[in-house]
Image (spheres, rainbow, N blue to C red):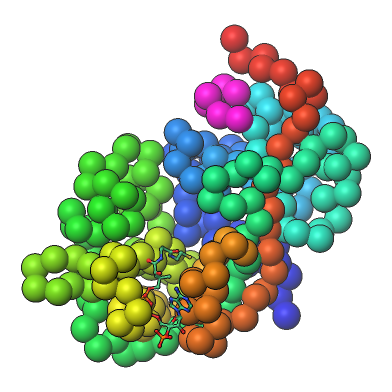
Amino acid sequence: MEPAETLELQCALAWPPVTGERLGNWWLRAADGFTGRANSALAIGDPGLPLAGALDRVCDFAHSHGLDPMVQTVKGGALEPALADLGWAPNVAHEAGHEVSVLLGPPGGPAETSRILEEPTFGWWELCAGTSEPSEAARHVLTTAPALGYGVAEVGTETVGAVRGAVVDDVVHVSRLAVLPAYRRKGLAVDLMAAAGAWGAARGATRCALQVSVTNAPALALYERLGFTEHHRYRYWVPAAASCEDRSS
Ligand SMILES: CC(C)(COP(=O)(O)OP(=O)(O)OC[C@H]1O[C@@H](n2cnc3c(N)ncnc32)[C@H](O)[C@@H]1OP(=O)(O)O)[C@@H](O)C(=O)NCCC(=O)NCCS
């Protein structure tokens, strides 16, 4: 099996921050607070300096972008005990869930009714960003990647389900899958996943990756049914308050 780090980098490229800065192999990311992934330091590989110094840089970068510092790690990787030794802890307060399962599965398809659009529509934004008027940062993250498709499931003129697909190398990264509550358990998510998978396969993807909170039971049940299995997990870590003072002002 390929290392978690390789897949993490591919997933990260599918979810680009507004501002990114390399710290050795780490990636410091900021996007005005839109999602943990785009507003944390991806701690993969060697940061190029001792860990305590690297974490100071993470804190300074976050503060200079008005963010609370956060590090994204591969769960169970060598970095986690070292972070804990320096007073960092899993960010159990992270709203979307601090522990995330990264799943791999076959790119499905073909879809029955769902379509992949080249541009996002109002209905797509409402489902995938929770608003038809997303912030600049949300717009940037969701519409920037090497190859992007915007999946919709429609009933009449209403968009009742949506998904985002991004192809990076041989992976189609699927995110933001959502179906309106009144239309759930009718197979629309399965169809949207098929549409995203077929769209990705037509652009060279041989597998599908997605990231789902370990607490999201409906989504985990859906993905298991579609043949996805867990590749690894990632977690978000935050510093003890006293170890990371704001030096940006
Ligand atoms: C997860 C979600 C997209 C599923 O959409 P959906 O259109 O209802 O899913 P489908 O009808 O295609 O479900 C297919 C299968 O997935 C599984 N499944 C879906 N929802 C489930 C639930 N709430 N509980 C248990 N299993 C579920 C079932 O096996 C289901 O088949 P069945 O209805 O024949 O039992 C929807 O619940 C949703 O929008 N949730 C909020 C957003 C979200 O969590 N997105 C995932 C982010 S990773």
Q: Residue furthest left?
A: 157
Res. 166 image quadrant: bottom left
Q: Position of residue 151 (x, y in %)?
A: 28, 69
Point 18% across, 54% down: residue: 122
Q: Residue furthest right?
A: 85
Q: Position of residue 23 (x, y in %)?
A: 69, 39
**Nearer to me, 151 or 99:** 99
Looking at the image, residue 203 sits to the left or right of residue 80; the answer is: left
Tally of numbered discs: 0
Residue 218, compared with residue 94, is above or below; it is below
Where does ligand 1 appear, by image quarter?
bottom left
Q: Position of residue 174 (x, y in %)?
A: 44, 68
Residue 163, compared with residue 90, is above or below; it is below
Res. 150 image quadrant: bottom left
Q: Quadrant of the N terminus?
A: bottom right
Looking at the image, residue 220 sits to the left or right of residue 231; the answer is: left
Q: Quadrant of the C terminus?
A: top right
Magenta residues (range) = 63-68
Q: Is residue 148 visible?
A: yes
Residue 98, compared with residue 116, is above or below; it is above
Q: Is residue 10 visible?
A: no
Q: Position of residue 81 (x, y in %)?
A: 88, 49
Res. 109 image quadrant: bottom left
Point 38% across, 39% down: residue: 137
Residue 21, compared with residue 248, is above or below; it is below
Point 74% across, 25% down: residue: 241
Looking at the image, residue 249 sits to the left or right of residue 49; the answer is: left
Asked if the stretch drawn in magenta spans residue 80, the answer is no
Point 68% across, 45% down: residue: 92
Q: Residue furthest front?
A: 182
Q: What secondary structure predominates along the stretch shown in magenta? A: loop
